[in-house]
Amino acid sequence: MSSVSETTQDTTGPRGADGYDGYVVAIGASAGGLDALERFFQCLPSDSGAAYVVIQHLSPDHKSMMGNLLARHTEMPVVTVTDAMRLEPNRVHLIPPANMMTVRGDALRLSPKNPRGLTLPIDLFFTSLAKEFGKHAIGVVLSGTGSDGTRGAVAINDAGGMLLAQDPESAKFDGMPRSVIATGLVDATLSPDDLGPRLIEFITQAPQIKTENPPQDPTFDKEDALEEAMHLLKHQGGINFRDYKPATVMRRIERRMQVRHTPDLHSYVRLLDSDRGELAVLRRELLIPVTSFFRDPDTFEILDQTVIRSIVSERGENQPIRVWVPGVSTGEEAYTLAILFAEAFERERHWPSFKLFATDVEQQNVEIGGAGVFSEAIAAEISPERLERFFYKRGNHFVVKNEIRQNIVFARHNLLEDPPFTRMDLVTCRNLLIYFRTQAQERALRRIQYALSPGGYLLLGPSETLADLHTDFTAVNSRHKIYRVLRHVSLPLDTATPSRPPASAAESRHYSQRSRHQSTDAAAIDAGQSILLRDYAPTTLLLNAHGELLHVFGEAARYLRIGEGSATLDIAKLLPQPLVPVAQALLYKCARSGTAMRSDQLGIELPSGEHERLRMAVRPYDAPQSERHLLLSFESEPQEVIPRQGMETLDLDDETAQRVENLERELAATRESLQATIEELETANEELQATNEELMASNEELQSSNEELQSVNEELYTVNAENQEKIEILNRLNADLDGMAKAAAIATVFVDAELRLTRFTPEATTLFKIRNGDLGRPIDDFTNLLQYPDFIDELRRTIASGEMLQREIAAANSRIYLARVLPYAVRAGEARGAVATFVDITSLHDIERLQAVLDSLPEQIAVLDPQGIVTQINRSWREAARHAGDPSLSDTGPGAGYERALQLLGPDGEHPCGRELRAGIRAVLEGHSPAVVVDFATTDEPPTRLAIHVSPIQHHDGGAVLARLDASEWHPHEAED
């Protein structure tokens, strides 16, 4: 048993002396994970001392708001990771979009996400975290679809870390939680509100774990406790974990103590004794299925080039290829080898018989591997070409095709205790020996050497060696641990000896709680019993029900012989030939009747050349919790003696004749049964052959259908992409239309062919009593302010005829509108509805009325804007301009400046009145004068007295009104002068 220091050494991943070395909590979440993350962090304290890392499936094209959202639910700072950012306690680190993230030392490293193919960011980070932080790694899997995080969770558990998962019932999407729970390695399954407190319990419990002797029980010894745990494990599953390294076993026990909140080893052993569930969990953790497809790709590439191709090319059609993978876990490595051999067969155009034996000590692993169903996460380990060639998709899983699966035999097998396979061309035993003690490693390697055919190949893990067997192998590739056996060995004797049956729980406790001084007494008792057996008891052999030697009492060498050939424990091949028929008859009779049997006196020549008279006796012996055994004794008799009381003497001649007759009858019955079985098997084989042909035909049809579906899927993907682009265009056009409608500020309503409201502009609500929720209602359901009784009829007419209708209408709000009703069609000639617009022309109407008023006046009137530009004139002004030589109104009409207009219709600029008039107009326009009146006489004959009156326009952004009128009648005395 190893010392305490050996069993408690820390083997966690390396971290810098100055770097972060606390707990790292990695939280994986996907669809529906936001709510779970918020609830998880809401229940966490801000001073737990752990660093938190959140890994999500984020869209690479959208900015993530996760930082702002989580910051509302935790007092810890929330940061988005940048490359080489160091972990800090009591801080939340978020993966940025379009990136994959790992941890090296205590630094978070980023790499661009592959835009094509399957990406598993949670698996990637969990795996790197397990490697770097070991038992300080904690994985939490929350809501999400798929199986991302499952393989990484196995790595965390293998490193001694803790695993938590959200209760699937509380998850919006339960794919990821269910996938990781199915591994059986999750330490707790809770709602997000309860995960946080459970996590804090685990972190705070760690420093309190003790594996030393508890003070309340000074007689309790740590090695005895560990031994009792080994007995309990042996009793439940039949696996002897004493062959495993104590440091590995102890590290697992300490982790379970932390999870179960047991303060010391004494309490935990008592828990194992009373809780079979915890015993099963510990056993499962000691047998962690850590594996993957093409693990260490370089090694498999070298194996393919140097070993597999060589085996395939040298093998004839009738020479089978046999491969064994002990410790296969859930089967990934077995399928990897089968794929490589299948590819080699195709390259060589050569298909010999091929059989691969995949074995593991854990029945659950064997069943998983035999099913051949794996999560979609394997797409990160296998190339797309191999996935398509050797797997088919079923839901969220990949299933191994039958052409690979049919060549693999999965079976439960204990490498250290069960007989090994034989005649193997290749054995791969990777990362299994590292868990064994040195003696167990050598025992396992001897069994593997026996299993290999002459010249067979062996592949070990990167950290494993041949130790003392290096002289029996030659290295094919030392770096990748590929070897070839040089000599074959016989089957080790301990292989054929059945392992001791598991002891009961009571026996386990009794064994482990004995103190060391008792073992000295036991040794003395055993020695005394040996002396008595040697001196007074006849030489006796303990046999099982199959006649195989289990144990020898006394000096049996004089009666046994060992011949050439393979070693055997069959008693019929160990006894001298004259004793064989007698022994077989006695054994047969005793086994059938259950009573002790004894032969007549026999005279034989011993292997030593001596002659001896003896009797052979057989007694039945029922061992506790085991099948019936037989005791074969050699009673040496120098003279004739009377048979012992209670034992039947066997008449050898009669018994032999009866034995032969019975055997002949059994042989005849067996032949008849065998013939019937052969016929049944032939019939079943024909049926299976027909079924297989049907399945092959169905498979071809399914393959064809799959290809068609794939083609349709690609087309749908293309159409979807085009539709997405069209939707984007329509969204932009819709936004443009909304912008145009708002900018135009025109009341507009859209109706379909049934006059149901489909759309409207905000301005339409001033005329119609409609709201946003009224879409789909008939337009005549709404009251309006329009004096437009024919509105509904004209909508119908436009939809039916496709013509546009237009008219001016008044409204109850004293406004005037220009109503236009137009057809609304998707394609030409196909009316889908109508559009009604209502343009407010009240101002235009007012301008027209004002123009009519101005035209009715005899004065010549022009309206100036604040810059002195003519904007409006009346009929009299136009007539005066025509008489002055400007019929086109280019110098006197709208758009002309008052200076140019006055050149024709006013006094000359050099005339004093002209200067006065121009100065007065500027003063009025600038607001310095309320009005200006200038009289002047024209230069024509006879001269005419005119007056120009300039008045400012009030309350309309300025400007002026210029009126030109005949003043002769107003000043008759001036005319006389």
Image (tube, grey):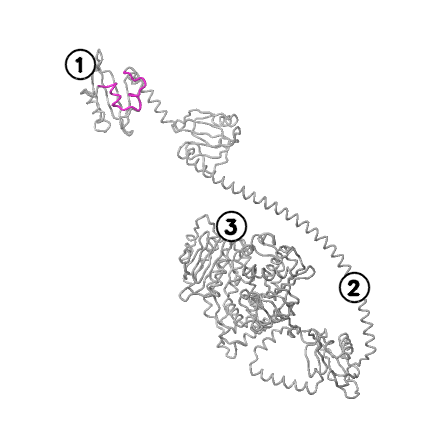
Q: Nearer the viewer, mark 3 or mark 2?
A: 3
Helix, strand, or loop for circle 3?
loop
> Which residue type carries mark 2?
Ser
Question: Where's the C terminus, which quadrant?
Answer: top left
Magenta residues (range)? 884-907
- Of the residues under marks 2 and 1, which one precedes in the sequence? 2
Q: Which residue is mark 1?
A: 974
Q: Residues within 10 Å of mark 1 (few under 14, many from 20)?
A: few
Cα–Cα span, label 3 and label 2: 61 Å
Q: Are marks 3 and 2 in contact (CB under 8 Å)?
A: no
Look at the image and say whether residue 778 sits in the magenta stretch. Answer: no
- Mark nearer the N terminus (3 vs 2): 3
The overriding secondary structure of the stretch rendered in magenta is loop
Instruction: Choose between 423 and 935: the one closer to the eye.
Output: 423
Q: CA distance from mark 2 to mark 1?
A: 157 Å
Any part of residue 639 in sight = yes
The residue that disc 3 covers is 116
* Residue for badge 2: 673
Instruction: State the SS at label 1.
Output: helix
